Amino acid sequence: MTVSQKDKSIEHLRGMIAKMKRSGELLLPTESELISQLGVGRNTLRSAVNELVQSGSLEKIQGKGTFIRNDKTELIFSNWAETEFTDVPLIQEFIRQFESTNEDIRIISDSIPYTLYVKRILQHLLNNESSDIMQTTPFWLQRFKHLDALYPLSGFSQPHYIGNQYQRALELEEIDDEIYAINWSLCPQVLYCNKRVMASAGLDPEKPPETIDDFERMCRQITDASDGDTYGICLPLDSFAYNYLQLYPFLMALGGGFSDSIGNLTIESSENVEALTWLSDLYRYSGAVQARNINDGRMLFSTHKVGFLLDGPYCRGHLRRLSGRGKEFDGEYSIALIPKGPSGKGESILLSHSLAISRQCREPEKAYKWIDYLSNNEENSKRYFDDFGMIPCSRDVLEKPFYRTDPFASVLIEQLENVSIGPLKHPLFIKSLPFLLQIMPGIIIEGKDPKEQLEFLSEVVRIIARDKTMIYL
């Protein structure tokens, strides 16, 4: 589905309206100024403005200009979902459906690219321009709570909602026994297997690796069978914080990790030394050495240059876009459970896309109506799964044939039985992450002594733990 110039203009104007409302402005720029800003023709602009007038977002006053209407409760919804795949106006469809049954509420989408999201949200907070509702992840929830930016939601959560979710998923929403977000969809990491690359290396594309040893052997076989331009895996090793979580399942498979089950730090453990040594060897013999981030890996996978990719279900949409083939590319790969380590388990990191209400929201009850609509509407969940890959949080819904018989969803559901929230809930993890990201490339790429580097990191974390004033953004 392609997006017309008119639709693009409407979305640009919606974003402009959201920003103007934050600053208290109501008068839109002149028609000439808008034509210049949007880069469209006069007829296209007028058509877009007229549609927003008809929908009640704008009003024209003769001789004065076009103004933002403010006769409904307007809630600004900051999200990155709308920026992920620009040819799927799914969020706008949800907004139209919601507003049709909630006539006193208007949702304004403030769409922000994922890589800029935290920075932009923090700018809003510092400038006292906070959104009413925010899409977030467990990775960011601690930061927003630290800044007292979140409205507690325990009073809104119903017993059925709490009892119908996976326990690990519920833990992602809580901070100090208070719920600060409602899960929208679940994102367990899984292993993507490129069927064409596997077949070219003499591997059975219908038999993914079941153990870490199988995985390492297959990665090497893929690399050895190529002419030097195809690799077993791309390990994300740049400074983007999320990349560490893409490596974490390999640490868990070999018994390592940031902390143990009761929160004790295990940074300098022998298991972590073994896991990082293993990753370094994997990178040296089977890794795409010219690629350093997860987007590089997705691009190589979508062009059949990488055999395996450890990623979340949302990667499905990225692969469709990067391959240029849309949903047809779904048949080029399969997904599998995380390979098992010596413990006999293949643990995945569980993330979620969740929804939170800003502390500055003036109408939290109405804001929660939007959250409830997104997270508990079964048809919406199906659409979100189809376009974005994530599965709903309700156990009851996931038990239905639609998900249990879908090859993609069924693997995600099976992986949910063996997931970890890893270091996400540890109070020192986010504070330690900048230092952790500095040492990982040195160990894996440059071959620095992992024991020495981990001992250094462990001492840094102890210093951070003693410094109660350290703020992390």
Image: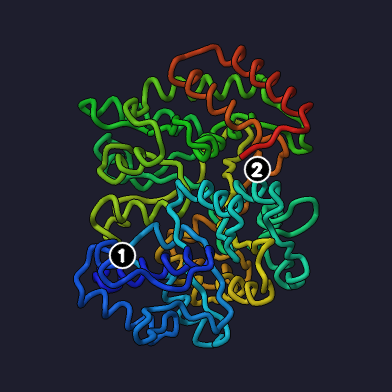
Would you place residue 290 above or below residue 317 in this image? above
> What is the distance, in whole Å, between disc 1 and disc 2 at their CAs?
32 Å
Tell me the residue at 27%/37% (across/down): 305
The residue wearing badge 1 is 87
Q: Residue 242, percent across and down?
A: 51, 40
Q: Residue 465, percent across and down?
A: 76, 29
Q: Check residue 424 in the rendering and tell me which mark sits there, or answer none.
A: 2
Relative side of 76 to 204, left or right? right
Q: Give the amino acid type for the residue marked by disc 1 in the picture.
A: Asp
Comparing marks 1 and 2, which lies closer to the viewer? 1
Q: Quadrant of the C terminus?
A: top right
Q: Residue 18, percent across and down?
A: 48, 67
Would you place residue 64 above or below residue 364 in this image? below
Tell me the residue at 58%/45% (across/down): 349
Q: Which residue is at the front of the view, 215 or 77?
A: 77
Q: Check residue 146 in the rendering and tell me which mark sits there, or answer none.
A: none
Q: Earlier in the sequence, mark 1 or mark 2?
A: 1
SS of the residue under disc 1 = loop
Q: Quadrant of residue 392?
A: bottom right
